[in-house]
Image (cartoon, rainbow, N blue to C red):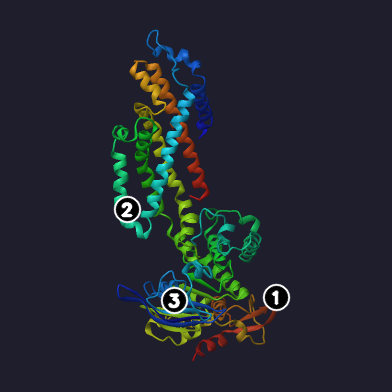
Amino acid sequence: MIEIDRITRLYNGVPAVDAVTMTVETGTVTVIVGTSGSGKTTLLRMINRLEEPSSGEVRINGESTLTIKPHILRRRIGYAIQGHGLFPHHTVARNIGAVPELLNWSADKISARVDELLRLFSMEPATFRNRYPGELSGGQQQRVGVARALASRPDLLLMDEPFGALDPVIRTRAQDDLRRIQKQLGSTIILVTHDMEEAIRLADRVAVMDSGQLVQHGTPAEIITRPATEFVADMVGRVERPLRLLSLVPVSELVEEGVAEGEALPVDASLRDALSVCLWTGRAAVPVEQDGVLVGRVTFEAIRARARAHP
Amino acid sequence: MRIGTFLRPALTLLLLALVLRPVWFTPFFAPFAPAGGPVIYERASLLSLSISHLGLVAAASAAATLVAVTLAILVTRPAGAAFLPLSRTITNMGQTFPPVAVLALAVPALGFGAGPTLVALFLYGLLPIFENAIVALSTLPPATMEAARGIGLNRWQQLLRVELPLALPVTLTGIRLSVVIALGTATLGSTVAARTLGEVIIAGLLTNNTAFVLQGGLIVGLFAVLIYDALVQLEARLVRRTGG
């Protein structure tokens, strides 16, 4: 559990982060969203003490980060940033193994871990281990950057706009990969972004920052349906609100008996995907399948009712 | 590149022949020698002069590299930034002071021989290395430096594992300039009795023997060209490795 306790950072007397208190449960993804200058990156950087708080403290599993030397603390916390920040003069393997090397793991253990991570990110170890970052595509560099952050199985992974430099198609894939890997490893992640879409896709909890203050901290559904301030409502976007809400609900929730025409959607697709198919094909229902077997359908009416059924 | 594959070994062979078997070149140098005078310099072995010449250059350049890079590292740390203008002034003075003047001033203090030459070459070599090292260390990719801190490298580790390796190619350019300047300038050392290839040139000038001047000049020139070329290749290799 990560406890952020009344943490404040002043620049020339002006607070960039103003008495933010927030708790992050182990094994969850918290996404901090805000506009530029909202203090979201400063808040993130105070967790691994790349910025020193002016007051307040952060506790990881009850232990204050102020009691640990900063560089030792950072070896326990994974860190991935926009533009990956890989070491251009080291191979992929050496980049990923950087933190284990600092922690004096044995060479065999490091190399086994590197291969494991490369496979996790669908990169063939034999092909990629000895390449230099300059020889990789943007998406591959970014995956190596995240793999490096995960290498020592850190208590916590901090990510600062990790997908900001990727084009939209690769970004969506990278987000799916991250979610899959997070579920598989049970990692605790705090991620900063300015993109509400990304926040809703990835987060168990969304934290919205505005002018240095934490204005709302809740599940994506809460943020969408009960925005605490005008600013949060603007961040979510009034027009996108129903679609964002539907994107959180899997079709499995509304599957009913019956048949429908057309190509089937998997049960873990979202209602937004189902709605999109209905609108595009002009049909009133979409068939749903699980592992290749038809399990029923989801109707346009049901989707409409679900979108209205917010508190 | 293509031309280099032939020229490089050819020039190396020419240089070796000039240093090891100078007598072979008697017919070539004879027209430049005064009537009845010696054609080939024989007062000292050219090999031992070359070794001493290169040794002086290597020692002075190594010392200049050590001092200039250390200074550059210090003034690119947050705590040392205030000393940047001062260090610039010092290294600039080293460069503007003519080596001949340094030699003249150093002789009373250090006596005749290699000492004054080393001092002059050292001072003259500082500036290019210092300036290049500063540029290299202050233009490192920001995301890489942020990541280096963020994953838990301490200051030393950041410097040794990330900053210096990434700054190496540009710093090496400075060292190359400095070495080439020193190779030529070292000839002046013979005016204060340092053993360098300048001895051959000066002997030629004193006795109006153009053959000696050519012989000495040719050897120094070939050393400079070949060493310059080798360092360029080394830089290119380093840049390729760091993904440029």
Q: Is residue A87 above or below residue A191?
A: above
Whole-Å distance between the Cαs marked 2 and 3? 40 Å
Query: In the image, residue B102 lies at what x, y percent?
Result: 30, 35
Instruction: Report the residue marked by disc 2.
Output: B84
State the residue position of label 1. Answer: A292
Output the chain of dot 2.
B
Spot the residue most to the right.
Answer: A293
Residue at image coords 36%, 54%: B75
Q: Amino acid at mark 3?
A: Val
Q: Secondary structure at mark 2?
A: helix
Q: Is residue B79 left or right of residue A115?
A: left
Q: Nearer the viewer, residue B114 or A100?
A: B114
Of the numbered discs 1 and 3, the one sitting upstream in the chain is 3
Q: Residues within 10 Å of mark 2 (few under 14, many from 20)?
A: some
Towards the viewer: A11 or A239: A11
Disc nearest the viewer among 1 and 2:
2
Residue farthest toward the bottom in the current orientation of the protein? A311
Of residues B128 and A292, which is closer to you in this image?
B128
The residue singled out by tag 3 in the image is A33
